[in-house]
């Protein structure tokens, strides 16, 4: 059975304790690997190594840091089959999807490498005639990167690449559900020849994660995770006033106007909701349908949702894969049962499958109301609740009546409707006539409880910098 060791200061390190973290294939519940759990002393040593390496890394011209990132992008592409094979086993994804995720990780790494000559400061006019104000962009130092289970390879480089190009070094904690792919990335880091200590990767329990995040040399903590995890990170940040960057929960609303291409919208929404069993932060989580087309649209959704079959994607890639674990499956099923008890109509799905694997069927619920738990709380699974509305203003009000504000979707052929939602939606993103895809040249940032800061693009890269004002008298 596979056994992975932690990677720190440029090498895979021998375990300092007997703690092993078991990694389970969610498609068949088989234990596929163990990874060594880092001790608190090892986590502290990794931060110290990152801090020491950062002194030299930040002094490199950004163009030279970019050379390393391009080498890392090449290595990720070369290692994509191995990274993908590990990811497929630990996540339940198909090998093709997992390998493509590694390729996309290489692409976002190359994208951020190209910011090397575009990390710009400012010259600001002074009120005094004989001085200049110069604003510099500088690295923060050591960044702790906390990676989720759902897209762990892409998100790894989504955080690490901009941190590195800005002159920081990183200590990465992968999810304990999907750590083996992170150690395949470590092999790519070795292959690329990055200086020792610039990238450190350690699996760990919660106590060790706290020791990592509260280390006084950690200047920033970036997390993609739940609201509960975000609150915990904010507590960690308080210890040393570290900078937080949090991408948290989502409850993406999709508004379907009467003039929309209903067939396309139905296909798109079902694809969004069933990709990786609905375990996407921006997957469609609630659907608001104009009353004149409501019944017709529910029929279309039911047709497409009913056609989705679940199973082991290593055997049949076209199937919808499993949830991450049994706790997630039980939580989702409980939400569906409570929605039905509260008056929702079960159109399809909604049952616990027999057999091994953490599967749950594509589930459609109609006759939902705005105050239901299924509308107000994130499911993070293949559940689609539908609410009827009369006017676009009513739909906008319900879409905004929420704790989350990550992404949103509108289907319409009317530019006035599109502009009304674009100017009124309380979310960091709006997608018109398509479902979310997080373009890496954009800016993926949530409102409300969906987070602080953001990822991607120029603004995502600048999250990993701080400013210094130099006032020059002459």
Image (cartoon, rainbow, N blue to C red):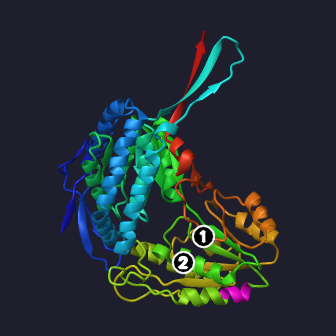
* Nearer to me, 30 or 473: 473
Whole-percent x, y for residue 176 in the image: 34, 61
Whole-percent x, y for residue 40 in the image: 29, 45
Left or right of 352 in this view: 400:
right
* Nearer to me, 188 or 291: 188
* Residue 297 drawn in magenta: yes
* Nearer to me, 384 or 369: 384
* Nearer to me, 284 or 244: 284
Q: Is residue 215 visible?
A: no
The residue located at (70%, 78%) in the rendering is 387
Left or right of 9 in this view: 392:
right
> Which SS does the magenta portion mostly show?
helix
**Rendered position, 36 above or below 30:** above
The residue located at (54%, 53%) in the rendering is 441
Image marks 1 and 2: residues in contact by CB distance under 8 Å: yes
The residue located at (59%, 57%) in the rendering is 450
Query: Disc 1 or 2, which lies upstream in sequence?
Result: 2
CA separation in Å, label 1 and label 2: 9 Å
Give the residue at mark 2: 271
Tell me if mark 1 has few (under 14), some (14-19) or many (20+) residues whose alpha carbon lies within 10 angstroms of its own: many
Residues shaded magenta: 294-298
Residue at the top extreme, as displayed: 474
Left or right of 150 in this view: 202:
left
The residue located at (40%, 75%) in the rendering is 326
Whole-percent x, y for residue 344 in the image: 65, 84
Left or right of 390 in this view: 314:
left
Secondary-structure class at tag 1: loop
Q: Is residue 473 visible?
A: yes
Whole-percent x, y for residue 86 in the image: 29, 67
Quadrant for residue 143, please give it: top left
* Residue 352 drawn in magenta: no
Give the residue at mark 1: 435
């Amino acid at each position: 059975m596979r056994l992975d060791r932690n990677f720190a200061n440029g090498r895979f390190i021998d375990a300092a304790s007997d703690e092993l973290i078991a990694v389970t294939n969610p498609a068949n519940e088989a234990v596929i690997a163990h990874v060594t759990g880092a001790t608190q002393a090892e986590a502290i040593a990794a931060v110290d190594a990152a801090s020491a390496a950062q002194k030299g890394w930040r002094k490199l011209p950004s163009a030279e840091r970019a050379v390393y990132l391009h080498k890392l992008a090449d290595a990720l592409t070369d290692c994509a089959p191995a990274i993908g094979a590990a990811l497929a086993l630990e996540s339940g994804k198909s090998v093709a999807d997992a390998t493509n995720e590694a390729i996309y990780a290489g692409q976002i790494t190359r994208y951020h490498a190209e910011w090397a000559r575009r990390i710009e400061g400012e010259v600001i006019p002074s009120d005094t005639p004989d001085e200049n104000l110069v604003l510099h962009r500088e690295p923060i130092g050591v960044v702790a990167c906390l990676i989720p289970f759902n897209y762990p390879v892409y998100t790894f480089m989504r955080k690490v690449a901009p941190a590195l190009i800005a002159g920081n070094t990183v200590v990465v904690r992968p999810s304990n559900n999907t750590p083996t792919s992170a150690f395949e990335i470590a092999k790519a880091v070795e292959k690329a020849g990055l200086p020792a200590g610039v990238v450190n990767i350690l699996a760990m329990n919660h106590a060790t994660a706290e020791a990592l995040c509260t280390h006084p040399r950690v200047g920033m903590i970036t997390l993609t995770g739940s609201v509960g995890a975000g609150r915990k990170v904010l507590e960690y940040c308080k210890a040393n006033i570290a900078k937080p960057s949090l991408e948290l929960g989502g409850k993406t609303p999709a508004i379907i106007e009467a003039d929309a291409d209903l067939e396309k919208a139905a296909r798109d929404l079902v694809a969004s909701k069933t990709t990786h069993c609905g375990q996407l932060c921006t997957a469609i989580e609630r659907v608001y349908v104009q009353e004149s087309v409501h019944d017709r649209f529910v029929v279309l959704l039911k047709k497409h949702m009913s056609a989705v079959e679940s199973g082991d994607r290593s055997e049949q890639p076209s199937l919808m894969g499993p949830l991450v674990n049994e706790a997630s499956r039980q939580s989702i099923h409980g939400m569906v049962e409570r929605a039905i008890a509260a008056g929702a109509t079960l159109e399809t799905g909604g049952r616990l499958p027999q057999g091994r694997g953490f599967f749950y069927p594509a589930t459609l619920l109609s006759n939902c109301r705005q105050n239901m738990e299924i509308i107000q709380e994130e499911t993070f699974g293949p559940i689609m609740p539908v609410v009827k509305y009369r006017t676009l203003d009513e739909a906008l009000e319900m879409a905004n009546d929420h704790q989350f504000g990550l992404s949103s979707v509108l289907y319409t052929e009317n530019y006035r409707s599109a502009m009304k939602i674009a100017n009124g939606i309380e979310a960091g993103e709006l997608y018109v006539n398509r479902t979310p895809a997080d373009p890496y040249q954009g800016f993926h940032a949530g409102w409300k409880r969906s987070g602080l800061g953001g990822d991607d693009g120029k603004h995502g890269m600048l999250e990993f910098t701080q400013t210094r004002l130099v006032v020059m008298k002459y």
